[in-house]
Image (cartoon, helix red, strand yellow):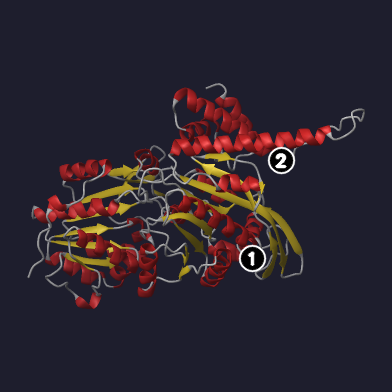
Amino acid sequence: MAARTPAIETFPALRAWQRKALVEYLRRRSEDFMAVATPGAGKTTFALRIAAELLADGTVEAVTVVAPTEHLKKQWAESAARVGIQLDAAFRNADLHSSADFHGAVVTYAQVGMAPQVHRRRTMTRRTLVILDEIHHAGDSRSWGDGVKAAFEPAVRRLMLTGTPFRSDDNPIPFVTYERGGDGLMRSRADSVYGYSDALRDGVVRPVLFLAYSGETRWRTNAGEELAARLGEPMTQDLIAQAWRTALDPAGDWMPQVLRAADARLTVLRNAGMPDAGGLVIATDQQTARSYAKLLEQVTGEKAAVVLSDDAGASARIAAFAASEQRWLVAVRMVSEGVDIPRLAVGVYATSASTPLYFAQAIGRFVRARRQGETASVFLPSVPHLLGLASEMEAERDHVLGKPKERDGFDDDLLERAQRDDQASGELEKRFAALSATAELDQVIFDGASFGTAAQAGTPEEEEYLGLPGLLTADQVAVLLSKRQAEQLAAQRRKAAARAAEPAADAPAAPPAPMSAAQRRVALRRQLNALVAARHHRTGVPHGKIHAELRRLCGGPPSAQATIEQLEERIATVQTL
């Protein structure tokens, strides 16, 4: 028996962006359409509605969905079945054709790359809509890209979906349109764009607070030399990589302290209206993931779920965690894109991978909103590049071809090289021993702005930020962070005044100690945030847009990374606006 045509009237109501994009799609009726929407916005629902429309009016007879992972194949099939579209998630290349009980199949990019001719024949047999989920994966390798192009050129329609339409290489993405800009470079063009800032305004996604932790790190090189560095301070790349690696060492103090703080934040959220809130630790490799799980059990008294690879067992563990009220999940890489666990609200970014693409995908696991006022909190090392990515959450990017490439983050290859290169000390080699690392809350990043001054882990100052209410709008988050920062600074001033009053009245006053560069940066960030907040109250323009305008006028990175001179220039500029 042939699969029934899905009933359009049974579909859930569409969000405003989905309706607008659907109207645009039906108006154009073009072969290719690319929709860019932030994680959590509802790309799957949008795509399935298009599939139902085309099946109902006879434009297509079959649907093929191409997903990045095996787990997402099952997720797509389950979502489609709920709206009357039957997709075969168990299709193998050896099967050649799906049963007539299905409207089509869900496959992976790797599966298509292995046997593109199989999928080309399937596409030519029936008029087919191909949905390419997270289409940027088609540029991951020449075989994948060439396979996708060969397999689906005969398709009647191709719908490309992505939440991160950019890559760090020049591999063109099949079926994506590129247009030459005024600078002569080719940029990808989307037919529908719904960014994080749009979704945040509409209440579709959660506001994300980034809690950045610095601290002192010490390690020993293979040559026996002991090195020390403060995480987050300007250093050469190899030293940053070594300090970062030392902080993430499960045998040190940094990770236990950060996990303890993250679990405290999770408890606050659970007590404040999100009783099933869950946390996710993203680890670099399997060994450290298991170690982090043991640390979490020591901190919480409850075992953490662990997902180590993309296999059938991993999918079952993810599904079980999503349906439970278990506190923590520890994963290696795979829970970084498309995996739908709406209750995830606290994250610990404990991985060395930090390209913009990977970072955006990872943070996308925490932004899906279920009710008004839910917030997300992500704990991360105070590494300059990560702070920049956190400050640019709302940035929209395109895939640019031919642009001179600068390394835009660390990955495992860079860390491996940093362990043997001698850029800074002449002695840094592949093998080293992490000696110690302590954690300190450096700053809280929200809406492109940096709040707070340094607070040691486990102190009342840190608890002030960990205890922020769990149900807040984006505007309330900004107001509360400003208030907490002001209270923190007032308390510091009172302590300083009390210390100054301690000497005898006739004793000469000691001259104030000169501020360090780090203290000056904190003070300038505080002053800049206060001026931006004042302008927000006068004009109603969001904090993030004011910071973005100052960056446009003055140049330089986000305020979390800006130098003293750049902060001073922005302060002078905002005073003239």
User: Mark on residue 517?
Assistant: 2
- Which of label 1 and label 2 is nearer to you? 2
90 vs 547: above or below: below
Q: Quadrant of the N terminus?
A: bottom left
* Residue under numbered circle 1: 419
Relative placement, left or right, of 557 versus 425 is: left
As helix, strand or loop, the secondary structure at mark 1 comes to loop
Q: Residue furthest front?
A: 271
Q: Residue 41 placed where, x, y %?
A: 33, 48
Q: Please name the amino acid that badge 2 sits on.
A: Ala
Q: Nearer the viewer, residue 196 or 557?
A: 196
Q: Residue furthest right?
A: 506
Q: Nearer the viewer, residue 110 or 328?
A: 328
Q: Residue 25 placed where, x, y %?
A: 20, 45
Q: Residues within 10 Å of mark 1 (few under 14, many from 20)?
A: many
Look at 73% across and 62% down and name the residue there. 426
Relative placement, left or right, of 495 versus 16 is: right
Q: Please name the amino acid that badge 1 sits on.
A: Gln
Look at 62% across and 58% down and name the residue there. 257
Q: CA distance from mark 1 to mark 2?
A: 28 Å
Q: Nearer the viewer, residue 158 or 226?
A: 226
